[in-house]
Amino acid sequence: MNSEIELDKLINLINNNNKFAIFTHESPDGDAIGSSLALYMGLKELKKEVDIITDEYPDCFNFLKERDKIISKGKKDYDVCIALDCATEKRLYDPTKAFYKSIHTISIDHHASNTFYAECNYVEDKSPATCKTLVRIFKKLNIAITKEIGEAIMMGIITDSGGFRYDTVDDETFEIAAEMLDVGVNISNIYRNTFDKQTKSQFELSKIATSRLKFINEDRIAITYITLEDIKKTNAKTGDHEGIVNIGRKVEGVLVSIFLRETEKNIYKISLRSNSDDINVSEIAEAFDGGGHSKAAGCIINGSLEKAINDLIKETNKKI
Ligand code: 5GP
Ligand code: MN
């Protein structure tokens, strides 16, 4: 697919319509919320009517402007529905199915596994974050990047690149960071709100996960889990599990870190991280009908904890 043609199509769809709704993937992360709020503010600059519809998100994103505009259900018919940071229809959070009732649909994303489910699909699979991709679109639309838009964009770039750590970060990412500093974005404030601050429950949950961490296959796989009981015991809220998958990832020799989180009885949300250029964890996730990026991926597994762990280890061993 020629992405320049898709980009022109996208620009025309935005310029020629009025009623927009913004959607993203379920359990939104920093890039999902950052890109949704940035696009909301950008479309408002263009005097459009806009709704933002998302699933529950962690309180740590509440420092961003316009977060109070987020609603949990699509309210009406829209001219254009835009899905951000969402690779597949299955992952899209849309309880009223408004996305497919709209006249036009757009997907703006950076997942190589994007299935091109919208009418217009603008996917930059080398981009570290959907938020970075949005900057290019904003320039084409002549949207001025204000300090508030810049904060939302930087939050997405910082969280999805692990704080400029991952190899998706390129020279343009730093150029954009410099542009955001120029409009007044406080980068250390974004770090403080995301990576450098924990709720007490998050700390307690990490303690449990750390104590359960196992090393397998000569320490090349690190695996841990939390259960519904742990979540209840620590009074954990949405997002309090963030960062747990990185505990094992940091240990020397570990190639793949795996984290299982029970979301409903016997339903586990899996996070996978790779430390190796030769191990693409999205392929492991795909074996369980999930997906993601080569170094960070996820899936959902139903069944007992023991079986989920065994199946994940078996599939990971095939790639090592
Ligand atoms: P996390 O482990 O932070 O939840 O997700 C890491 C990455 O994996 C996300 O950026 C997303 O691309 C992908 N991912 C997570 N869960 C799923 C899933 O259930 N299905 C698919 N297709 N991708 C997922
Ligand atoms: Mn993303």
Image (cartoon, rainbow, N blue to C red):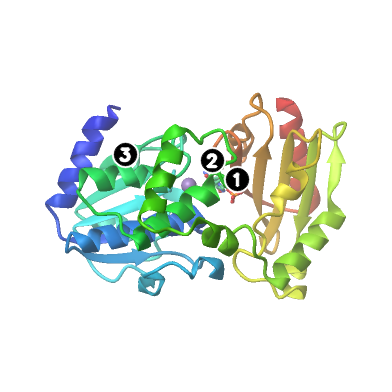
Q: Is the CB of mark 2 within 8 Å of ligand 1?
A: yes
Q: Quadrant of the N terminus?
A: top left
Q: Is the CB of mark 3 within 8 Å of ligand 2?
A: no
In this view, the mark in front (3 or 1): 3
Contact flag, marks 3 and 1 (Cβ < 8 Å): no
* Callout 3 crowding tier (Cα within 10 Å): few <14, some 14–19, many ≥20: many
> Is residue 222 shown left or right of residue 192?
right
Q: How many marks?
A: 3
Q: Residue placed at 59% from the left, 67% from the top? A: 238
Q: Is residue 125 visible?
A: no
Estimate the spatial distance between the alpha carbons at disc 1 and disc 2, rounded to whole Å: 6 Å
Residue 62, position as x, y percentages in the image? 49, 70
> Is residue 33 shown left or right of residue 269?
left
Which residue is under mark 2?
Answer: 292
Q: Residue placed at 44% from the left, 39% from the top? A: 173
Label 3 residue SS: strand
Contact flag, marks 1 and 2 (Cβ < 8 Å): yes
Q: Residue placed at 80% from the left, 41% from the top? A: 251
> Is residue 167 shown left or right of residue 241?
left
Q: Is the CB of mark 1 within 8 Å of ligand 1?
A: yes
Residue 317, position as x, y percentages in the image? 76, 30
* Quarter of image, res 50: bottom left
Estimate the spatial distance between the alpha carbons at disc 3 and disc 2, rounded to whole Å: 17 Å
Residue type at numbered disc 1: Gly
Residue 11, position as x, y percentages in the image? 19, 44
Label 2 residue SS: strand
Label 1 residue SS: strand
Query: Tag on residue 12?
Result: none
Query: Tag on residue 122?
Result: 3
Residue at the outermost left position: 16
* Callout 2 crowding tier (Cα within 10 Å): few <14, some 14–19, many ≥20: many
Which residue is under mark 1?
Answer: 298
